[in-house]
Amino acid sequence: MQKTATLNLRVDPDVKQSAESVLAQLGMSMSTAIDVFLRQVSLTGGIPFRVALPEAPRSVDAGSMTDEQLRDALLRGLREV
């Protein structure tokens, strides 16, 4: 299939450089990687990987701590400083 569509994208220069470095190690161009991504979107009917906010480790997740656990963690942190 002949490729005739053009995409113009604006991305963070550092992200682009980092991605190009990884892709070069894989022997893949940015154009090929984006083509693979778009094909997977078409095949799966969505983004082909999980998109979510990272979860905080239980040890630092203040929302899941009791008041006493939170107080102890804060005091421990203050002692370490």
Image (tube, rainbow, N blue to C red):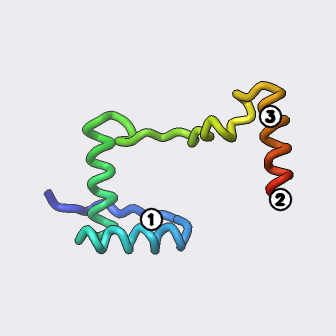
The percent position of residue 3, horizontal first and vertical second, equals: 22, 62
Residue position marked by numbered label 3 in the rendering: 70
User: Residue sitting at 52 percent across and 65 percent down?
Assistant: 10
Mark 1: which amino acid?
Asn
What is the quadrant of the C terminus in the image? bottom right
What is the quadrant of the N terminus in the image? bottom left
User: Residue sitting at 55 percent across and 67 percent down?
Assistant: 12
What is the residue that sits farthest to the top in this orientation? 66
Of label 2 and label 3, which has the lower sequence position? Answer: 3
Rendered view: 42 above or below 6: above
Q: Secondary structure at mark 2?
A: loop
Mark 3: which amino acid?
Leu
What is the residue that sits farthest to the left in this orientation? 1
Q: Secondary structure at mark 3?
A: helix
User: Residue sitting at 32 percent across and 49 percent down?
Assistant: 38
The percent position of residue 33, horizontal first and vertical second, equals: 30, 60
Residue position marked by numbered label 2 in the rendering: 81
Residue position marked by numbered label 1 in the rendering: 8
Of label 3 and label 1, which has the lower sequence position? Answer: 1
Left or right: 17, with 68 as reference point:
left
Rendered view: 25 above or below 38: below
Rendered view: 26 above or below 56: below
User: Residue sitting at 28 percent across and 44 percent down?
Assistant: 40
Neighbor class of circle 1 (other Cα within 10 Å; few <14, some 14-19, many 20+) is: few
- State if disc 3 and disc 2 touch (CB < 8 Å): no
Q: Name the quadrant containing residue 34.
A: bottom left
